Image (cartoon, grey):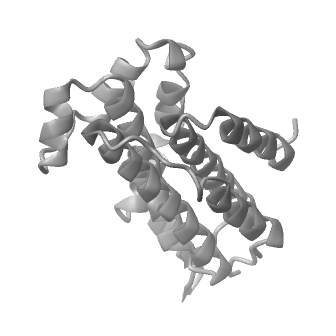
């Protein structure tokens, strides 16, 4: 049986609101801010792409972008909070940053991530995200239902993926707000997140 997931209008409204919330933010022109801000913009674009792909029932590609979005967010935080000036310059010149595990360990030494949430996300979701990004067996299983080759994702699985994209999209927008010194905008985003994901 093929996937029946339907994107709700709230996902599009939420996405558009996030983008509009930081449209007027101005950030300092330092290299660190430009590089970190670019990572955030890329994470936001992945969020936009995931929503657009889900709206067109293109599930495989939407799930493949989750790891890309997570990595873009982690790299931003590492560049902002941990990287030396030389590491920022090297990254801006095209050099690879440390492996994601090392970046997360460095981030967990900072007060912002002392709760180790990024490590928990990586532990719980990294293998799945990698399988979806690299067409692993887990991803192939979603295409093999009986004698037909077609997407057969569980709707709940797609809802969880969308929620992850929305959360990291919001975190990326909050990151832009903080880089711009727009704490009021950041608080408005947190309020919108609480409305979108009530306990």
Instruction: Say if 162 sits above or below 49 in the image.
Output: above
Residue at left 74%, top 73%?
A: 5
- Residue 96, given in percent of the width and then of the height, sits at 17, 43
Residue 1 vertical placement versus 164 (above, below)? below
**Quarter containing the N terminus:** bottom right
Q: Is residue 158 above or below residue 29?
A: below
Q: Which residue lies furthest to the bottom in this view?
A: 148
Side (left or right) of 131 relative to 90: right
In the image, taking residue 190 as reference, residue 66 lies left or right, namely: left
Name the residue rendered at 12%, 39% in the picture.
90
User: Along the line of sight, which residue is nearer the eye, 188 or 72?
Assistant: 188
- Residue 138 visible here: no
The image position of residue 36, as x and y in percent, is 36, 42
- Relative to 115, 159 lies left or right: right
Quarter residue 102 falls in: top left
Which residue is more in the foreground, 123 or 107? 107
């Amino acid at each position: 049986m093929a996937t029946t997931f339907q994107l709700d209008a709230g996902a599009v409204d939420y996405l558009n609101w996030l983008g509009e919330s930081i449209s007027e933010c101005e950030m300092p022109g330092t290299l660190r801010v430009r590089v970190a801000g670019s990572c955030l913009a890329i994470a936001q674009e992945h969020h936009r792409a995931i929503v657009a792909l889900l709206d067109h029932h293109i599930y495989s590609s939407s799930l493949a972008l989750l790891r890309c979005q997570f990595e873009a967010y982690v790299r931003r935080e590492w560049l902002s909070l941990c990287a030396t000036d030389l590491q920022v310059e090297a990254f801006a010149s095209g050099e690879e940053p440390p492996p994601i595990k090392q970046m997360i360990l460095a981030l967990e030494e900072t007060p912002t991530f002392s709760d180790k949430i990024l490590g928990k996300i990586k532990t719980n979701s990294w293998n799945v995200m990698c399988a979806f990004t690299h067409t692993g067996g887990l991803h192939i299983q979603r295409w093999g239902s009986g004698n037909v080759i077609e997407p057969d994702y569980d709707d709940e699985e797609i809802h969880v993926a969308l929620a992850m994209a929305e959360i990291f999209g919001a975190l990326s927008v909050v990151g832009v707000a903080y880089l711009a010194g727009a704490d009021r905008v950041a608080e408005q985003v947190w309020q919108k997140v609480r409305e979108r994901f009530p306990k």
